[in-house]
Amino acid sequence: MSRVTFTAGKGRRFTTSVRKKSGRLVYVQFDPSIMFGNVGESIYTTSDAEVIEGLKAHPRFGTSFRILREIDDTPKVEEKPQQPKNYADLCKDKENIVEELSVVDLATAQNWCQRTHGTVFRARKAETIKQEAAEKYNTIFPNFN
């Protein structure tokens, strides 16, 4: 979703209307911005795609008002490297894999590691603990979500 700010010039109050595809008329008013007692540009900001298209197609676009800035608000999705879901593939000894069914959460995973190996997992995330258990201790936790 993008957000567009239109301007109608400095200190000028400008009003118009835009018809949406549904037939509804949208009232658009450019209001002057006032900062520290000074009158700035008259602006109108919207994120409605139909209103943006309507204002760009308006006969007075470019003469009475124009686009001041466009801001893209769509969240950026970062690609994370895919962790293998089958932790048995990470085990070194494929024939002697231990399935520990009693481990169901972070606390029981830490207790299991303390009881069986005398140490605790350095990680605090479930995926990292599962990976570490498979690589170091040849153990998988099928009930650990």
Image (spheres, helix red, strand yellow):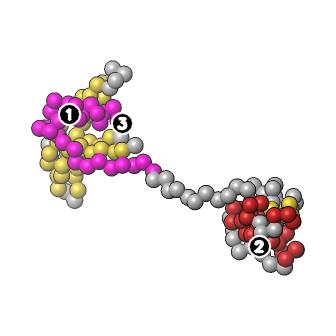
- Residue 106 placement (x, y as % from top left): 76, 64
**Quarter of the rendering occupied by the C terminus:** bottom right
- Residue 138 placement (x, y as % from top left): 81, 68
Q: Residues within 10 Å of mark 1 (few under 14, many from 20)?
A: few
- Which residue does the image show at 23% across and 35% down from the upper left? 56
Secondary structure under the numbered disc 3 in the rendered image: loop
Give the residue number, with chain letter if any, for mark 2: 136
Q: How many marks?
A: 3
Secondary structure under the numbered disc 1 in the rendered image: strand
**Quarter of the rendering occupied by the N terminus:** top left
Using the rendered view, name the quadrant where residue 15 is placed.
Answer: top left
**Which sits in the foreground, 37 or 86?**
86
Q: Is residue 25 above or below residue 39?
A: above
Give the residue number, with chain letter if any, for mark 3: 48
Give the residue number, with chain letter if any, for mark 1: 15
- Residue 6 placement (x, y as % from top left): 23, 43
Query: In this image, 22 relative to 65: left or right?
Result: right
Of badges 2 and 1, nearer the viewer stands: 2
Sequence-wise first label, 2 or 3: 3
In the rendered image, the residue lying farthest to the bottom is 118
Q: Is residue 81 above or below residue 110?
A: above
* Three-letter code for the amino acid on which mark 1 is drawn: Thr
Q: Residues within 10 Å of mark 3 (few under 14, many from 20)?
A: few
Sequence-wise first label, 2 or 1: 1
Query: In this image, 70 relative to 64: left or right?
Result: right
Of badges 3 and 1, nearer the viewer stands: 3
Sequence-wise first label, 3 or 1: 1
- Which residue does the image show at 73% across and 56% down from the upper left? 86
- Which residue does the image show at 45% across and 51% down from the upper left? 75
